[in-house]
Image: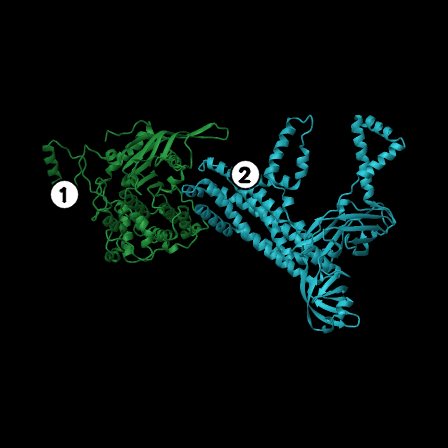
Amino acid sequence: MVQTDPAVISAVKVSKTFRDFWLREKVTAVQELDLEIGANEVFGLLGPNGSGKTTMLKMILGLLFPTRGRIAVFGRPPTDVVVKSRIGFLPEESYLYPFLDATETLDYYGRLFRLPARQRRRRIEMLLDMVGLKSVAYRRVGEYSKGMQRRIGLAQALINDPDLLILDEPTSGLDPIGTKQIKDLIRTLGERGKTVLLSSHLLADVEDVCDRVCILYAGRQRSLGKVNELLGRQAYTQLTTEQLDAAMVERVRTMLEAAGREIIDVATPRDKLEDLFLRIVQQAQEKRDEAGGVVVGGEVAEFLRAGPADLGRAVIEQLVSAAPHVDAPPQDKPPAETAATKDEPAGRVLEELVAPTKPDRPERRPGRPKPPAPRPARRADPVDQKIIDDLVNDGSEAGREDH
Amino acid sequence: MRSIWAVTRYTFAQCLRMKVAGLFIVLLAVALSAMPFMMKGDGTLAGRIRTFLAYSTSVVNLLLSLVTVFLAVAVVSDDVRKKQIFTVVTKPLARWQYIIGRWCGVVLLNVVLLAIAATVIYAVAQYLRSGETLNANDRRAVETEIFTARDRISPTPFDTAPFVKRRIDRLKEQGQYEPAVETYMAQKRLNHQQAQAQLAAEINKQITEQMQSAGPGRSLRWRFSGVDTTGSETYGKGELLNVNHKARLARIRTEAAVLGRLVFDGPVRISGMDGRVRRLADSSFDVLFSQEDALRGGFAKFTPGRKVDIVVDPTIQIVYKASPATRLPDSIVRSAWHVWNPTTGLYYQDSRTDSSKIPATLTVSARLVDQAGRTEVRFINLTRASVTILNDDVAVLYQIGGFEWNFIRGVLMILFNLIFLAALGVFAGSFLSFSVGCLLVLCGLLPFAVAREFLIDAVKLRAGSDAMVWLGHYTVKIMAVLLPDLGRMSPANTLVDGMNIAWATVGEAAAVSIGVRAMLILAAGCWIFHRRELARVQI
């Protein structure tokens, strides 16, 4: 189901005040917040600890009721049961039943979504594969490490193939591989036309996946806009070339000075530590070193990858699953390739799958370039820092235009 | 429905995996296995079985009630406290469905645990039943007073009106009536009419008391009607041990269930021939055949070792409690009892020695009841003191069903009780933390379980009641509607006495306990839970 209504979530002047037992006002967690999140959007709620992100998410989920204002999800009140069947939610910690094992946990939530038994079983298998917990599927969730619980939490949020995915601090407690997987997943879902709302204070994660962000501080909205517009520094141009010696740099400087431009900085770009880490793990995996608990997760589960082109598949899925292992329809990838690509890193497989599906979202950045392109020097940081500094200092409108 | 079932199913699994359910099973096993050997009762087998049934059903009831309350409060309040509720209510599951699912899960657990407990109790009771009895009376008590389901008929009330009238007429003749009325008017500040009524009531009371007491050598008489024993014959098999053709006697070995239903001189049919019971022993009895049947030839074929069919006529029991007016030296009430069929005139008499003020049972053949269900009983006081048997202390009991179904009905009563408690627990968990929720349930229930009548009486509205009494009155009234009388719901005493629990009683308990009380409380729980902000921190 693809949502045609432009506003998936609309919040109008929402405020939330917590009162104590004697009804005295204690904390105003959210103040007069307006939010409009459309279909097909990856939206980030940003802010330091205690800025009202989670409170806002809980109001959108109907776990808290706004003191003032109105919230509608898919045009209905958040407590509406029909609305909930289209939502997937990952709380800030995975609150799971410790006495159930991974399969039972997913089965329970699948039942709450009234998924038919066969579909439920198929999805559980695919999701466990995706989050890399297949080998521990029959261990009690209570015995899991925090990261493993997080993975199960993610799996339960996806079991209904949600139209709206709400993730509260999705990458907390996850290793870089898990983090990357979540980011890949968010991108994939975004490309499929799903709406993703996530809250985080890990700015790099948000920057990598979000189309739009809203920055909250002390319950108020401080900044709202497209990530590209907020972060793009239109006044500057960055060139990346093969290594230049000092003489060559001097020549370029002279050339630019002749054109009335000035070089501001010359630096050797560095890889992100994340990329280095992922590369090392990938190499280890290729050597087939045994991992202890979590097996590095597989690719995004098939039912989550299905593009808008094959809408009827959700229905057909059950019928098809009667014949075992008719996993991928031809337009996704030919069966012959399945075996060949199986051991490839998740990102690359994902990229191949995702690339042709969504022509209407050209501005989205690709997953991961094949030869890892040199990142811009960490000069990007001052921009992020500026925003935070501004809002920490005076809480006034942070630089929306000045960058 | 499917979502509710999912919650129910996983609640059941949760309860099983929580140690509480396991602990219950262990405790129950220990309690039940130790009980029959620890308790000797009064030395008779009947006493042992009674003690066992009373204690085991009470223990199971109490244990399961506690388990139910704790689990029901925990399954909801823990979800909120540990925030697992976040992932559950954000699924397409209405909050009332969650509450109902949780309740059903606890009920399902109760059904399973109760079924296990009931099976164990039943098995142990049957094992005890097969044990050695002290004597034939003991065996009869086991079979006809415990492993049965009996109904109770009280005597037709005395019509005191003619006696009252006669007494008043006599007073009037003697010219003492008006002075007595005037005394009442003066003493109690009544008008003439009220004083007359008071006097008549006083006379009525005296006459009623007189009619329930018999001086030495005097008798008391009761009429019973509505006794229906059709279809309560006992069928069994036996083996001829000894046959005396000349004396028309046969000794037959048979099972305990048949032996217990035989009464001395009571009618019995052996392979189609009428006889009377002569001697009752632990595993056999003697039958004296009628001359007619003995001559007809069937009896001639009787040889030792032959298998025979036994049909025992139904019996009725007269239970009574005799209280002597003065202390008797040996505390023994001696009496003669006559029971007769008012239509056929069939007559039975027995002399008895009973401990005073202790209920006693006299078992007689149901042929003493006529087709209209009437029988008459006379007690003749053979002690030197005057003896009182109150109308409420005498009754005819007769079998209307078997122990098995009665036991099942008793277990159902316990189950309904537990279903209500589960609703109460889930309700408390819907807005309170575990400890406070348990406290509320136990404190709310206990006064009503222990001292219901007292509470209701204590806050009765009287002229001049102040606001506090009004408040108390209506609080107690509402609580009395919402909370059941746990004592009355417990089937322990009824089962121990071998009294029938009517399906109507079971149905009424189901309707009131589940249909009204549990539903009202669950509705309140659902409403609160629906209105509640589940992400609010609760202390």
Q: What residue type is disc 2 on?
A: Leu
Which chain is in cyan here?
Answer: B
Q: Quadrant of the N terminus of chain A?
A: top left
Residue A71, quarter of picture = top left
Closer to the camera in the image, B425 or B509 = B509
Which structural element holds mark 1? loop
Mark 1 is surrounded, within 10 Å at the Cα level, by few (under 14), some (14 to 19) or many (20 or more) other residues, namely few
Q: How many marks?
A: 2
> Picture coordinates of residue B415 (x, y %)?
58, 48
Closer to the camera in the image, A87 or A32 = A87
Q: What color was chain A assigned in the picture?
A: green
Do the residues under discs 1 and 2 have CB atoms within 8 angstroms? no
| Mark 1 chain | A
Q: What residue type is disc 1 on?
A: Asp
Please tell me whether residue B214 is drawn above or below residue B463 in the rendered image.
below
> Picture coordinates of residue A338 (x, y %)?
26, 56
Asked whether residue B246 appears in the rendered view, the answer is yes
On residue A245, which mark appears? 1
Q: Which residue is mark 2?
A: B520
**Nearer mark to the viewer, of 1 and 2:** 2
Please tell me whether residue B475 is drawn above or below residue B37 in the rendered image.
above
Closer to the camera in the image, A149 or B2 = B2
